[in-house]
Each structure stands twice: as structure tokens, then as C-alpha cells.
Amino acid sequence: MIDVLYFAWVRERIGLPSERVDTQAQTVGELVAELAARDDRYAAAFADVTALRAAVDQELVDDFSAPITGAREVAFFPPMTGG
């Protein structure tokens, strides 16, 4: 089980701020594929992964090939903008 957190428009599209997910995924990308296959809300949220950033156990990851094996939490959010 892993806690998955959704922020900003990702949360709005899915309709949940977080959930506990039973997954066999070993990378962020595999988790995204599992979630996107759930239903249209998830598919819409993960349709353009270039518009998403992810953090594993509160550490920003550079790409979705990052491992999640043994992680407790994965968060998804849009890129931060300065200003």
C-alpha cells in the first residue's frame, strides 16, 4: 500500500486530495499507468504527464522512471512557477 497525494488541478480532476493505493508498480510511471486506467477522471488527470511533477517520500523526482519500491508516499502536482 502506498499513499498517493494529489494537488491543484490534479486533485480537482480526480476529485480526491489523497488515497491509499494497493499497487504492484515499481516506478512512478507504472503507478501513473495503473491510476490512469482506473476511469475517465484519472485518465484526464494523467493525460499529459509532461504537465506533471512527482515527489516520492517528499523528494522531488526528475522523471517518472524513478523507483517507488518501498516508498510510503507519492505526490502529483503541476510544475511550480515563480513570481
Image (spheres, helix red, strand yellow):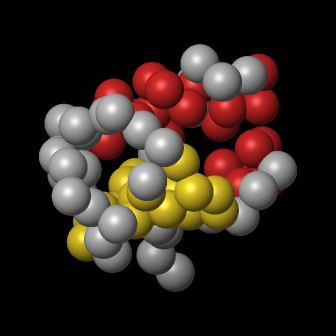
Residue 48 in view here: no
Left or right: 6, with 29 as reference point: right
Q: Nearer the viewer, residue 82 or 74?
A: 74
Question: Residue sitting at 31 percent across and 41 percent down?
Answer: 28
Q: Nearer the viewer, residue 70 or 45?
A: 70
Q: Position of residue 31 (x, y in %)?
A: 40, 36
Left or right: 38, with 16 as reference point: left
Question: Residue sitting at 48 percent across and 26 percent down?
Answer: 34
58 in relation to 66, above or below = below
Q: Nearer the viewer, residue 61 or 32?
A: 32
Left or right: 16, with 55 as reference point: right
Q: Position of residue 73 (x, y in %)?
A: 40, 65
Quarter of the figure with residue 35:
top right
Q: Position of residue 75 (x, y in %)?
A: 46, 61
Count of picture labels: 0
Quarter of the figure with residue 66:
top left
Question: Residue sitting at 63 percent across and 58 percent down?
Answer: 19
Residue 34 in view here: yes
75 in relation to 22, above or below = below
Question: Residue sitting at 24 percent across and 50 percent down?
Answer: 68
Q: Position of residue 51 (x, y in %)?
A: 49, 41
Left or right: 23, with 58 as reference point: right
